[in-house]
Amino acid sequence: MTNAVLNVAVLAVLCLVCAPVLRRLRGWAVVWTVAHLLMLTLIFDTLMIEVGLYTYEPSKILGVWVWGAPLEDFAYPIAAGIAMPVLWTVLGRRRRDRAPDAHVSAPAPDRADGTDG
């Protein structure tokens, strides 16, 4: 299996799973985030490949290069740009649901004038 096939499969499953939450998020914020992550990937992957930090097995990639990075590398920032806001939203909602109400846990004042002293 090539990296491109694996990336498409993972992105498709990710989009299906995240779709209900993504519909409630601000679309332009997610698009803007993904665009910035793609730009950073373009710059830093190209630099890391250029200095020889890693190489790719030619039989596992399509051979399509964007500037100096293989096309398959751009699936990871897309996945992160989609998954992180969804996780943040879901986990934040769970945290709020478990938090006790502030007005219930506050102690009552000791004196009639409202001071504790």
Image: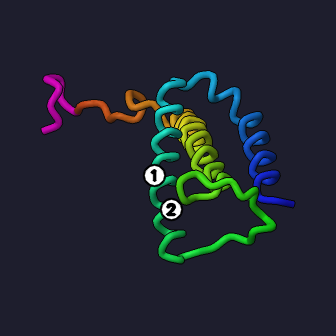
Task: Return the residue nearer the eye: 76 or 98.
Answer: 76
Task: Return the residue nearer the eye: 114 or 84.
Answer: 84
Which range of residues does the magenta coloring cover? 110-117
Magenta region includes residue 19: no
Task: Return the residue nearer the eye: 41 or 108.
Answer: 41
Q: Residue at x 81, y 67 (%)?
A: 59
Disc on res. 3: none
Disc 1: which residue: 40
Hey, what amino acid is under mark 1? Answer: Leu
Horizontal placement of 112 versus 53: left or right?
Answer: left
Q: Earlier in the sequence, mark 1 or mark 2?
A: 1
Percent from the top left, x then y, of residue 89? 55, 35
Percent from the top left, x then y, of residue 95? 53, 40
Horizontal placement of 39 versus 72: left or right?
Answer: left
How are the residues colored?
rainbow
Quarter residue 24 falls in: top right
